[in-house]
Image: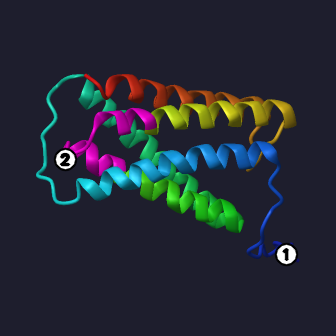
Amino acid sequence: MAESVPVVKWHTAKWGAWGWAETVVKLVAIGLGLWAGKVSIFAPWVTPGLDLRLVALVLLALATVGAVVQLTLRIKQKETISFVFALLNLLGHLGLVWAVVHGEFPLVVAALFGGFYVLGQAIKVGFLRATGYTEEGADSAGIQRFAVIQGLIYLLFTVFVFF
């Protein structure tokens, strides 16, 4: 006889101070990404040269792929707050990708976006270390390393976007 798989229903988890701090910091970045996308919505396409700004765009695109993965994971987990955040996160990343490709916004906005994500990832690493949190069967140390790598991607983006 086959085992039954428990059905996960949409729910709202209790988020502690670490989770809310990370969320608030990253929501600032998301707002910047959405704003940058909005102000450059009708700007012409700017083909990036083979320079560090292209590297910044590739790093941002990589982070955006991560946002897509995050959204699919949150749909699977059916946690309401995480899902809404993941959706906004993806939209903020897409807005900034659009703006970087079109080049019609202050670069300091992109740097602030990256800086707030670096800070958000630092908060996340603190949370992971303090709690040993894990999900999807991953070990805590692996999740911490992944969070650090994400933070480094945002840090490099923040530096390279000015070149």
- Residue 30 locus on image (x, y percent): 48, 51
Q: Is residue 58 left or right of residue 14?
A: left
- Residue 138 locus on image (x, y percent): 74, 41
Q: Which mark is residue 4?
A: 1
Residue at 30%, 58% in the rendered image: 38
Residue at 63%, 49% in the rendered image: 24
Residue at 76%, 29% in the rendered image: 141
Magenta span dominant secondary structure: helix
N-terminal of the two: label 1 or label 2? Answer: 1
Residue 97 falls within the magenta-colored stretch: yes
Give the camera-side residue of 1 and 118: 118
Give the camera-side residue of 128 and 163: 163
- Residue 157 locus on image (x, y percent): 39, 29
Residue 126 falls within the magenta-colored stretch: no
Amino acid beneath label 2: His
Disc 2 packing (10 Å; few <14; some 14–19; many ≥20): some
Q: Is residue 65 left or right of residue 58?
A: right
Query: What number of labels is visible?
Result: 2
Q: Which quarter of the rendering shows the N terminus? A: bottom right
What span is in magenta?
96-112
Image quadrant in which you'd find residue 58: top left
For the residues labelled 1 and 2, the Cα–Cα distance comes to: 50 Å
Residue 57 appears in the figure: yes
Amino acid beneath label 1: Ser
